[in-house]
Amino acid sequence: MTADEQFVAPLFAGVDVGGTNVKVGLVDNQGKIVADTKFPTLPNEPPDVAISQVREELNALIETAGFQWSDVVAAGLGTPGPMDIHRGVILTPTNLPGWHHYPIQGRLADVLGKPVTYANDAGAAAFGEFWVGGGQNYSSMVMITLGTGVGGGIIIDDISVDGANSHGAEIGHIVIDTRSDARICGCGQAGHLEAYSSAMALVERTKEAMGNPDAGTVLRDLIGETSPLSALMVATAAEEGDPLAVKLVSETAVYLGRGIAQLAHLIDPAVFILGGAMNFGGAASPLGVKFLNEVKTEVRRLVFPVLGERLVLNFAKLGSEAGFVGAAGLARSQYNRTP
């Protein structure tokens, strides 16, 4: 079978820059992955090195798939923030110290010879889910990613909500606790959702709970000199029925539900999608299903009745491919809007 029979032209390139790897992929006009690869980011090296390698990897992917460079009409790029999307500049990402204040959109466009659409990495992943993932049957979507931090994206009628200052959809920084002793977020501000519902927050809350000698838990037996406490340990213990771990996961669901309730009243999207590494096993796990149901319960407790009745909250479907697929999808959207 030839490439033309397998995929629908034109093709779009997607680039997802992370602190560890750069993921590069080719996606066809219907969102099907043609080919993809990844390479180490080398965060302390000049970003021109990575940009050049993106072109090399795309050349190899195109050749292997049996296409020509001319079949690729546009590219999408997602990077971690902070960033100035409108100027195409990556600003001061903590995990990419050698990339500060780099005009990444323009440089990639020059090297590829193609128009490049620029987005926050979480926004790109959200668009991937909106296009061909868990949100593809809806006109609007909010995606929330639970990992080391809390990220997300907002898509309304095929448009990613990036904001006037490139700080739109900073879901992890919704304020859910205004008390004077609220938890401090990694950004330095108090009471943010990320300070309560991220993997780092779960670890911190677990350490505090284990400080109580009366708190019985198997977690003390799992922690060793070479195995520090992690969110995965807490999830594993919860799956095994450990009372403290179960309680902590349920509390995480309540905190997340408070954040989603605010988004429901503000945006009223057709669907919420939950992604990221800390999904407690997702839809395939009893713990993941229980977690999602507890989030829904808290949301319904706090929102207008009609929002609670029509609430749709599902797990993401694309996994680690969402970033480059979504970046390619954003490029496709921009290409189709351009006369």
Image: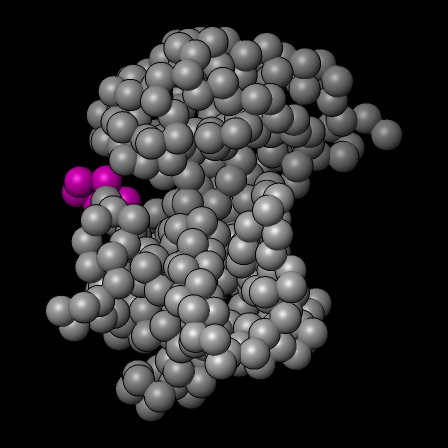
Does residue 168 appear to the left or right of 298 in the view shown? left
Task: Locate residue 193, reporting x and y percent.
Answer: 31, 62
Residue 56 visible (yes or no): yes
Q: Residue at x 51, y 46 (%)?
A: 128
Q: Residue at x 74, y 22 (%)?
A: 65
State the residue lying farthest toward the left.
180
Vertical order, 11 against 230 (above or below): above
Task: Locate residue 132, reporting x and y percent.
Answer: 57, 51
Does residue 22 appear to the left or right of 181 in the view shown? right
> Does the magenta run of residues contain 162?
yes
In the depicted view, which residue is nearer to us: 216 or 167? 216
Q: Residue at x 46, y 66 (%)?
A: 206
What quarter of the picture does the C terminus occupy?
Answer: top left
Vertical order, 327 against 302 (above or below): above
Coloration of the structure image: one colour
The kind of secondary structure the magenta stretch mainly shows is loop
Vertical order, 297 against 147 (above or below): below
* Res 190 → quadrant: bottom left
Vertical order, 334 against 144 (above or below): above
> Does the magenta run of residues contain 69?
no
Residue stretch in magenta:
161-166
